[in-house]
Image: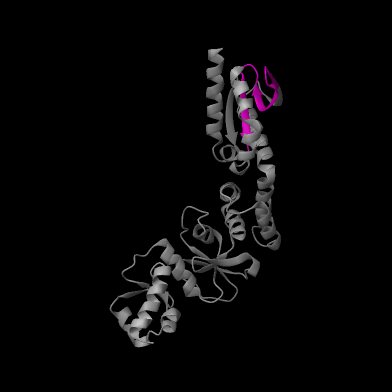
Amino acid sequence: MSTSSADAAIRRHVRAQHGVVSLGQARAAGLSDETLRRRVASRAWLPAGPRVFLVAEHEETPASRTVAAVLSVGEGAVLVGLSAAWWWDLYERPPALVDIAVARQVRPRDGVRLQRRDISPADRTRCRRLTVTCRPATVLDAAAGLGLQHGARVMDNALLRRRVTLPALREAHHRGLGRRGAPLAGKLLVMAGGGARSEAERRAHRLMRDGGIVGWTANTEIVLPGFGRALGDVVFAEEKVVLEIDGWAYHRGQRAFLLDGPRQSALAAAGWLVLRTHWHELTGDPDTFLSTLRRTLAARSRSR
């Protein structure tokens, strides 16, 4: 192959791989070792890992570092964990280390966190030129690695955006039973299936009791003229405040359809104020929940 043909083939790799090309790709395109040595010596190509180069006209970016890491590991490398979640646009920040699973022994690399692990064919796919865990396996892996609170946000967001489905997550979880992180992933799936709301209610009740907030009842019926009976998650009868407790955002759409609209209008017409909270606030920022509730109750007491 001529040098011009080789360069055309390499340019295609570079465009698709965020400025990165591997030694194997360069040779397969027809570039001679002598030409490659000249480009490295002139700093037209910069080392980006074992047998991987960044073309100098391209800036190093999180994407280029991710591609370089996977190409440097070579055959069998699978992008996993938070790195896979970021690659799928399921996590907002690129992690400091690139998480890669490979079934064989591989020497450590700077900026790479290697896992000796065989990824099932059912749990891996191709995304933007890289082999990566499929979205359900990625969500489970990333969520388990982040822990309950932050992992819940990743799973909730992926479900809300319809990037994964609950049945697909359950299937992927079943294939990974016994693996590290599986118990936490199982707990998150219970919450995703509706358990987050009941857990949110229990947390809200405990926070109110521990915070000395009194005068409330749980799951209380309110008779609304012209509407009928409405059930409030937490009712402060004296202040006429209803606290609605949601689970994850994933469940919010159906719950809003069932509870809002005419019901909320009827509550407002009867002089009730509806206050909302959710699992993420109750677990991640309980002080804000309590201070908002106290302010609301105080304001309502003064106005009555």
Magenta-drawn stretch, dominant element (helix, strand or loop):
strand
The single residue placed furthest to the left in the displayed view is 42
77 sits left or right of 68 in the view: right
Which quadrant of the figure has residue 248?
Answer: top right
In this view, the residue in front, 108 or 192, is: 192
Q: Which quadrant, please, contains the C terminus?
A: top right
Q: Is residue 27 magenta?
A: no
Q: Residue at x 64, y 57 (%)?
A: 181
Image-quadrant location for residue 258: top right
Percent across and percent down for residue 69 are 47, 69
- Vertical arrangement, residue 29 with respect to residue 252, above or below: below
**Magenta residues (range):** 222-246
Image position of 252 with respect to 92: above or below = above
Vertical order, 223 against 210 (above or below): above
Q: Position of residue 289 (x, y in %)?
A: 55, 32
Between residues 72 and 263, which one lies in front from this camera angle? 263
Horizontal placement of 272 versus 230: left or right? left
Give percent across and percent down for residue 88: 52, 59
Q: Is residue 236 visible?
A: yes
- Residue occupying image coordinates x 66% and y 52%: 166
- The residue at the point 61 percent across, 44 percent down is 250
For the N terminus, give its image quadrant. Answer: bottom left
224 magenta-colored: yes
Residue 20 in sight here: no
Q: Quadrant of residue 7?
A: bottom left
In the rendering, at what x and y percent does residue 162 appear? 58, 50
Question: At 56% from the left edge and 74% from the top edge, which residue is drawn?
Answer: 76
Q: Colour mode?
A: one colour
